[in-house]
Image (cartoon, rainbow, N blue to C red):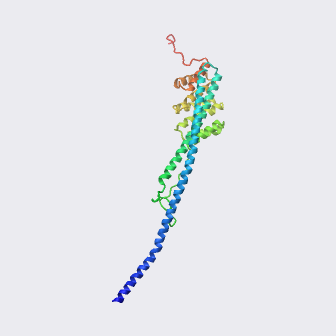
Amino acid sequence: MGSTLRRTVFRLTAVASFSFLLSQPRAFAASKEIVQLQTQVQQLQDMLQHLQTTNDERMGVIVNLVQQNTDAVNKLATLMNSLQAALKETNDASGSRNTQLSSQIQSLNDSVDELKSRVAALTTQLQNIQNQMQNVNGGSPQPGGTPPPGGPPQPGGGQAGPQPQAQAAPQAPPIDQLYQSALRDYNSAKYSIAESEFGDVLRYYPTEPLSGNAQFYLGEISYRQGKYQEAIKHYDAVLEQYSGNSKAPAAQLRKGESLLQLGQKDAAVRELRALVQRYPQTPEAQAGRTRLNGMGIRIYPAKPSAYQQ
């Protein structure tokens, strides 16, 4: 009986020892995986900190650029106001001086448009960086927490979570970028390139507010090249399709000037009078008044008398 008990105890001891030896590698492997996972989490946290520092520096630069461009826009606006005041004092001046002032105002408007476009592009870039930081902060692993789905690779070479799908390439650049490039080429007198770029704005973004500006500048390109009939078509498109656009008064003024260049004085007078009636408080309306006065024509047509009726 004693020997049987001893044999039983010996067998149980052997089984326990064997089980203990089998469990050691698994415990060691599990401990190694935890260490690897903790190392990967720490690496991700270090990368996140570096990314945040880099983006803070970039955001500081962009904010400074936005402020500089805003100051430039304000200076140009002040200069435009001065020119408009000078224009009001030249109602009886010659038509050549009025044309010169009108061209100066239009050039300033072009510069303001370009600066506004640059500010809008910088603002968009700043917003994208902020969104990127919010997304990174929202998906980053917290110390001691569970890594996000699709995070560090799992032991054995696997990847947790579904992989992101590649996005399709856009068909056209963003409208702000496309319009800004076109305006820059226009101001540099690269009319053939600018004409193609403004055409792309209309083709890819026909309903955007900047499309009305692009249509106007297509007319300006034709006007500067002496293609007055073609310019009138572009100005008509602005007035008919983008009547609420800020370029509509300038389009009507330019249409009247194009008609004068073509020798169609009566039609030009109708356009200039319509400009004054539709947009009476604009600099373009003031330029229209000066042009009519310079030609010796009443701003408002005379009402027929009772005898004429």
Q: Is residue 29 above or below residue 114?
A: below
Q: At x 38% / y 84%, what residue is drawn?
A: 9
Residue that protrudes farthest toward the left in the picture: 1
In the image, 142 versus 261, the foreground residue is: 142
> Can see residue 40?
yes
Residue that protrudes farthest toward the top in the picture: 307
Q: At x 63% / y 36%, what residue is drawn?
A: 186
Residue 259 location (% of width, % of height): 61, 25
The number of numbered badges drawn on the structure is: 0
In the image, 103 versus 155, the foreground residue is: 155
Residue 246 location (% of width, % of height): 54, 32
Quarter holding residue 237: top right
In the image, 204 versus 108, the foreground residue is: 108
> Can see residue 201?
no
Q: Is residue 134 above or below residue 235?
A: below
Residue 179 location (% of width, % of height): 58, 39
